Amino acid sequence: MKYIIDDNFLDDSKYLEFIRNNPGKANLKIRAFTASEALPLVGIHVVVRTKVGEDEFVFFDGETDSSGMIRTLSLPTPSLIPDNLEAPSSILYEILAESETMHMNRLYQVRMYDGICVIQNIELLPEWGSN
């Protein structure tokens, strides 16, 4: 995996080619909650990544804040061609949400399009079991 926060990542030839092919921008917000959106999930480990050929680029690796949010992430996408009659091009990103304390490991896939803001909800339902 190659992380965007690594010192050499922004100069990597595969990343530079990826950016040339994906000059558009889309925004992603992530909301983690439980109890029908009543309680935010704080400290959920979230990784946002995409696969490019054999490489995997990680654009975010962090935790949800006190509101259960990962605020706006700007992600590369193919450019939108105005007045084009074909379906717009997109790129598939994966969102991995993990929490050891809550025994949670979820993988979401989201298609991102130029100029669009996507809100990905991560809901953890309480587990009711006998003790």
Image: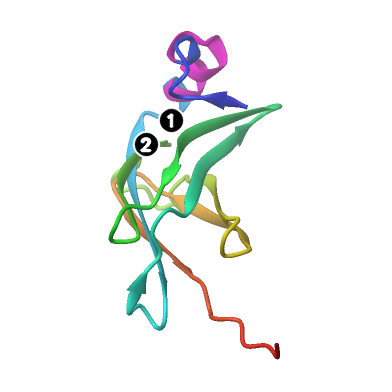
- Is 18 one of the magenta-colored residues? yes
From mark 2 to mark 1, how far is it between C-alphas?
6 Å
Q: Quadrant of residue 79?
A: top left
Instruction: Pick whichever of labels 2 and 1 is earlier in the sequence.
Output: 1
Residue at point 40%, 48% (across, down): 113
The secondary structure type at the circle numbered 2 is: loop
Residue at point 36%, 57% (across, down): 118
> 10 Å neighbourhood of mark 2: few (<14), some, or many (≥20)?
some
Residue under circle 2? 79
Q: Quadrant of the C terminus?
A: bottom right
Where is residue 88? Give x, y as percent: 43, 49
> 10 Å neighbourhood of mark 1: few (<14), some, or many (≥20)?
some
**Marks 2 and 1 close (CB-CB < 8 Å):** yes
The secondary structure type at the circle numbered 1 is: loop
Left or right: residue 24 compared with residue 127 = left
> Which residue is the extreme one toward the bottom?
130
Q: Quadrant of residue 26?
A: top left
Where is residue 21? Give x, y as percent: 47, 26
Left or right: residue 9 compared with residue 26 = right
- Is 22 one of the magenta-colored residues? no
Where is residue 116? Give x, y as percent: 31, 52
Vertical relation: 32 (above or below) 65: below
Vertical relation: 97 (above or below) 23: below
Kindly report which numbered mark, 2 or 1, lies closer to the viewer in this rendering.
Answer: 1
Residue under circle 1? 22
Viewer-closest of 123 and 39: 39
Magenta-highlighted residues: 10-19
Residue at point 56%, 38% (across, down): 50
